[in-house]
Image (cartoon, rainbow, N blue to C red):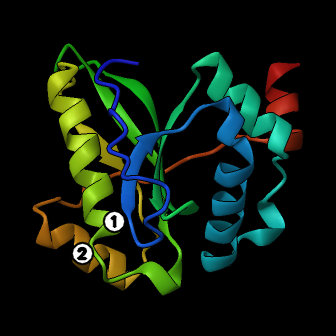
Amino acid sequence: MDGRVQARRRRPAEPDAVTIRQAGASDAGAVHALIRALAVYEKLEDKFQAGVADIAALLDSGACSALLVEHGTEAVGLALYYPTVLTFAGKRGLWLEDLFVQPDHRGKGHGLALLKALARITVEGGYGALEWNVLDWNTPSIDFYGQIGAEPQHGWTDQRLTGDALSALAA
């Protein structure tokens, strides 16, 4: 994917070092654990079905990319994203699927650092926008996004077709 983030690693002997780096398929276990923690936080754990191998396949195939925030050697935050198309603008876009920082690591700038890294990838890659969804009850995140200048999109609702309804339409 365009605009790969270069790892800014300190010596491993520094347990308090914080880095942001691009995740690879070998990081699927850490990415999976963070997505599971996000599902728990969003009260959607019953919808979580992905296995580590599923996440590895997505990352390995290039279907999506992920940035990890590491505190020492522990992955404590994640931004999972993929390219989209902005037809009205005639440009590519980036869709932020998941942004999550472990609760005990919040308030330390990790979420903002992930968004800044994604903004750089967006600008340097020639993408027209960085977009994402947020649950309407998640006011801490909504407030945070407002502070960085993100604007809610009014007049649009998400639609999803899955399971039996998807199969019926495909038949």
The residue that mark 1 highlights is 111
Q: Does the residue at mark 1 contact the one at mark 2 (Cβ under 8 Å)?
A: yes
The residue that mark 2 highlights is 144
Q: Nearer the viewer, residue 75 or 168?
A: 75
Please tell me whether residue 85 is drawn above or below residue 164 in the rendered image. Answer: above
Visible residue check, residue 154: no
Q: Nearer the viewer, residue 79 or 162?
A: 79
Where residue 141 sits: x, y (%)? 34, 75
Label 2 crowd (10 A; few <14 / some 14-19 / many >=20): few
Per the image, label 1 sits on a secondary structure element best described as: helix
Gap in angstroms between the C-alphas marked 1 and 2: 9 Å
Q: Quadrant of residue 58?
A: top right
Q: Nearer the viewer, residue 104 or 65?
A: 104
Please name the residue shown 75% across and 49% down the image: 29
Identity, as a three-letter code, of the amino acid under mark 2:
Phe
Going from N to C along the chain, the mark reached first, 1 or 2, is 1
Visible residue check, residue 136: yes
Please name the residue shown 41% across and 25% down the image: 83
Where residue 10 sits: x, y (%)? 36, 52
Label 1 crowd (10 A; few <14 / some 14-19 / many >=20): many
Where residue 75 sits: x, y (%)? 56, 60
Please tell me whether residue 19 is drawn above or below residue 38 in the rendered image. Answer: above
